[in-house]
Each structure stands twice: as structure tokens, then as C-alpha cells.
Amino acid sequence: RSGHRRMHRVGIATRAAIAATTAATTAASTTPTAMRVAMSAAPARATVAARGNNTSRLATIRPRMAPPRGIHHAASPLVCAAAPATTAEAGTEATSKTERRKRVLSGVQPTGSIHLGNYFGAIKNWVKMQEEFDAFYCVVDLHAITAGAHDPKELIKSTRSSAAIYLAAGLDPERSNVFVQSHVSAHSELCWLLNCATPIGWLEKMIQFKEKARKAGEDVSVGLLDYPVLMASDILLYNADIVPVGEDQRQHLELTRDIAGRVNNLYGGGKWKKMGPKGSRAPSGRFRGGDILRVPDAYIPEAGARVMSLTDGSAKMSKSNPAEGSRINVLDTPDEIAKKIKRCKTDAVEGLEFGNPERPEATNLLTIYQLCTGMTKEEVLRECGAMRWGDFKPALTDAVVEHLSPIQARYAEIIEEEGYLDGVLKRGADAANEVAEKTVADVRDAMGFMERIR
């Protein structure tokens, strides 16, 4: 009888343990991420069952350790990834696995000087994004020769200058990979492979090509037709999750997504698996099969960061505008800035205001003031709303000069420090090549090219 009582107690304990395990499993699968992260702060280590890809896995949650003093990490969403399934004995803790940070890629052409539109519309956003993303930023010198008949000496000069401005504006080589596009040969190689999978009709429909081809006539270059494919290769090489683009570039990003989808459909999935023995790996080390290229998403910067021309408030500030007075360059001297603002287009209406479609110049110049001072629109209007143009222009000049002065000072240091810029660009190109070569090798493999003999 005592033996029956012991067995009865064991049965109760077993049922209780099963119930507790079931409850823990349910809680782990239904508890919001934020709550699970908060639970991980408890001193004790907890092993919970998690579900992923229809497979039961063990995820070990550990208390998050504070970084050493002096090292600051930007706030970003914490992803708790389940460890791979294991056949280890029960009670053995699985090693937690951290998901890779999302990757971002962008670049600016080194044609002419980088102006406020490039700086506020792109580069300043990059500085923020380098804290949160695995960042690749390049000087897209291959795109700079698209129209043909470029000045080779000017290209070299502006390429170095653009890279130095990236750094002077706040890109940190410890947080971002800064490099020159032509220093990574995979850009050109992948462009050719994508060319052969892209219908020409897709390219002929591109708005920018149609507009510029009408102006150039028979002299239009093949590069102008094909540069969206080079842009696609830039993005796809780095498995970028998001790409910061302006509204005028959205069509090009959609083309990139279409090209990636077409390559994946033509050569990916089961077709790629059959390119080697069962269970074999591609040159990058991943298993063959599935998508070859990652399809990226667009990142449209917040409204208000778009800087327009000083001579036409309805047209964006552009390097291609032949009127030098239409833009303020990041490296312009205080005198040049004052002269351009003094001569910029205004209107005859009293007072200043945002958002009036009849007064695009007022919106543009107030926006530049807002961006340079860091004020809100409300603060700008309280300070400047009642001003006349004759009073506002000197205030705008002071704000622009004050904002650009530290960037110009840092730029001078970078240019003068022998070997520094070259070292940064080499490290950036090395990191870029490591990622890019794996991507283009997988595309070659899926398309049936013989593996390179080393």
C-alpha cells in the first residue's frame, strides 16, 4: 500500500511538471516580445520552449549585461532568436543566436560638389542610420560617367572630396563601411549578369531615361539606358534590407525589386538546388535553393528634408543645374553663401510662411533655416514669421554658415591628414568586397558558371 502511495505521489508530481512545462511553452509563444525581453532581465537563467518554422526549439534567455563604461550603444529593437534544434540530452542549454542587424546601402554621385540637398536629404540621414543598421555607403563613381564625356581629372578630385565630406558630416568608419564603388569589381560583374536577365522594355519605360533621351537624341549613351541595372547591382550585392531613396528614385528601386524577383524565379529555388549534389552548398557557404538575391524595401526620408533650388522653389536643388547660384555647396565659403542667399529668388508678399503652394520659395528658405538651426516649424515661425526678406536673408546666411563651419573644419583635417582617407576607403572596400563577392559568386553558381579555380 505504501508503494501505491509513492507511485500516486510520483504520478501527481509528473502531471504537475507536464502542466508547468505546457504553461511555460504557451507563455513563451504568446507573450509579447517586449515582455519576454523584460523577463530576461531576471537574475536567473531561464530555458523556455519556443516555436519557429514548425519545429520545437530551445531558446536560452540570459540577463542582458551592461556595456563597459565609455562604450555607448544606440537604442535599437532587441531580437531574441531561437537557437537551432539540437539532439543534445534534455536539460542541456542551447546557445542563443543573435540575428544580424538589418543592412542599409546608399551612395551619392561625385559629379560636381555635394550641396545642401545631398547633405540634408541623404548624408545626414545616413549618420543617424549607422547607429541602427549594418551600413554600407559608397561614392558611386561608376554612375558619374553615365552621360559620357566626363572630365577624368575632375572625377578623381570629386571622388576623394565626396568621401571626405561623408566623414566630415559624421559617418564613423567604426560604424559604417565607406568605400568607392569602382573599388569593388563585383558591381560591374553583377550588372552584366543582371543585364542578361532584364528585358529591355523595362528600361525603356524608365521616366528619367525617356526625358533625357528626348533631349540627347541619337547621342544618348547606352549607360543612360542601363544605369538602373547598375543601380540594382549596387543594392543587391550587399543583401540590403532597406535603401534610402527620394521620390524621384522610387521607380528605380521598384525596378531593382523586379530584377531580383526575375533572377530568383529564373535560377533560384529547385533549379539552383540541382546545380550540385543533394545538400551541397553554394560558393557563399549557404545551402543552394530558395532566393538567390534579397528583395529590398525602400526607405523614404521624413517630409521636410527636401531642399529646393535657390532660383526656383518648385525644383529640387541639383548638381546638374548649370546655374551655380541655384545651390549652396557644403564647401562654399561664408562669402559665397552670403552672395547666393542675397541673390536667391523670393516674392513680394509681407511675412514668411510654410506650406503655401503660391510661395514655394518661402517654404524652401524657411525649411533650410529649420534644418540648419534644428528648430521646429513653430519655433521658426515665432522667430521669423513676421520678418521681411531683407531681415531674414542675413539670419539665414548666419544659420547656414554656422551649421557648415564644423563640417568644413573637419573636412580640412581629413584632407590634410596623410593616408587617413585612403586607409578608411581601403578598409571600407575590403569589407564591401567580402560581402559582394559572396553574392556575385552565388549568382554565377545559380546561372551555371564554372567555379573559379584558385
Image (cartoon, rainbow, N blue to C red):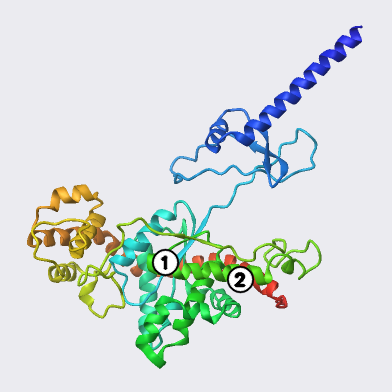
| Residue assigned mark 2 | 262
For the N terminus, the image quarter is top right
The amino acid beneath tag 2 is Arg
Q: Secondary structure at mark 2?
A: helix
The reply to whether residue 151 is visible in this rendering is no
Q: Position of residue 396 (x, y in %)?
A: 16, 60
The amino acid beneath tag 1 is Tyr
| Residue assigned mark 1 | 420
Left or right of residue 375: residue 161: right
- Of mark 2 and mark 1, the one earlier in the sequence is 2
Looking at this rendering, what residue extends furthest in the top direction? 1
For the C terminus, the image quarter is bottom right
Left or right of residue 181: residue 363: left
Q: Position of residue 3 (x, y in %)?
A: 91, 10
Q: Is residue 320 above or below residue 41?
A: below
The reply to whether residue 88 is visible in this rendering is yes
